[in-house]
Image (cartoon, rainbow, N blue to C red):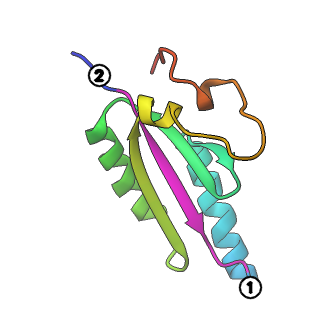
Amino acid sequence: MRYRVVRLMLFFDLPTLTSNDRRNYRQFRKELIKEGFLMIQESVYVRIVTNKLTAEFMEKRLSSIAPEEGIIQTLIVTEKQYASMKFLAGEQIDDVRNSDDKVVVI
């Protein structure tokens, strides 16, 4: 079976005004890390998945753990599209987060 590896990018802006909001933020962030997401910027996370169907499944799974308040968005991109991302400021980190080299998904 051939897999077309894609990346699921997740962007969120959650309220942190009250202690309840901050608790929801921390819990959501912990769940993201537990699900295998890597932070590439503050409030921007990415995860490698084996194909688009798996990415859509992960989106549904994330919607079940998402806090009720705030904005959470996802974007599915191919490895090639992800690797063509330009850095307008700052320096690129050369690791699995920013490379389209062959990826082994276990």
Q: Please indicate whether residue 58 sits to the left or right of residue 42 in the image.
A: left
Residue bearing the label numbered 1: 18
Please provide the residue range marked out in magenta: 5-16
The residue at the point 47 percent across, 33 percent down is: 48
Label 1 vs label 2, nearer the camera: 2
| x, y percent for residue 8 | 44, 44
Mark 2: secondary structure: loop
Could you say which quadrant of the image residue 60 lies in?
Answer: bottom left
Q: Residues within 10 Å of mark 2 (few under 14, many from 20)?
A: few
Vertical position of residue 41 compared to residue 1: above or below: below
Residue type pointed to by label 2: Tyr
| x, y percent for residue 70 | 55, 77
Vertical position of residue 14 compared to residue 2: above or below: below
Residue type pointed to by label 1: Thr
In the image as oriented, which residue stretches furthest toward the front?
A: 88
Q: Please indicate whether residue 98 sits to the left or right of residue 47 in the image.
A: right
Q: Please indicate whether residue 21 sits to the left or right of residue 9 in the image.
A: right
| x, y percent for residue 28 | 59, 61
